[in-house]
Image (cartoon, grey):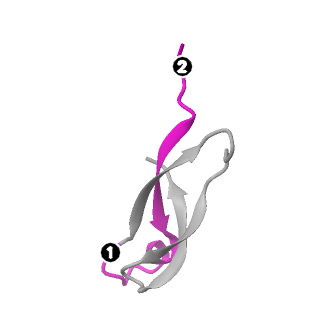
Amino acid sequence: MAKGKDVRLTIILECTNCKINKESAGISRYITQKNRHNTPSRLELRKFCPYCYKHRIHGEIKK
């Protein structure tokens, strides 16, 4: 039988540099999944930001 809570969660990653600098045209966001048991803390990945034109750290945000 299935358990009450799912192990894999859908999360949103947002560019930390665009959030700080309000001058950019927008905020880069990615949707991905993470395993709740393996990574209980907030996830941070280096992804490409089309507004900064560079690879920047994207951090997990609250839905």
Q: Residue at x 41, y 86 (%)?
A: 53
- Residue 41: horizontal and vertical position, in percent? 67, 49
Q: Earlier in the sequence, mark 2 or mark 1?
A: 2
Residue 17 lies within the magenta run: yes
How many badges with numbers are in the image? Answer: 2
Nearer the observer: mark 2 or 1; the answer is 2
Q: Badge 1, how many Cα within 10 Å: few under 14, some, many 20+?
A: some
Q: Residue at x 49, y 76 (%)?
A: 20
Relative placement, left or right, of 61 versus 31 is right
Residue 1 falls in image quadrant: top right
Relative placement, left or right, of 36 versus 23 is right
Dots 2 and 1: beta carbons under 8 Å?
no
In space, the residues marked 2 and 1 are separated at their CA atoms by 37 Å
- Please name the amino acid that badge 1 sits on: Gly
- Kindly identify which residue carries mark 2: 4
Q: Secondary structure at mark 1?
A: loop
Residue bounds of the magenta highlight: 1-26
- Residue 8: horizontal and vertical position, in percent? 54, 39
Q: Secondary structure at mark 2?
A: loop
- Residue 14: horizontal and vertical position, in percent? 46, 64
Front-lying residue, 33 or 23: 33
- Residue 54: horizontal and vertical position, in percent? 47, 85
- Kindly identify which residue carries mark 1: 26
Relative placement, left or right, of 37 versus 29 is right
- Please name the amino acid that badge 2 sits on: Gly
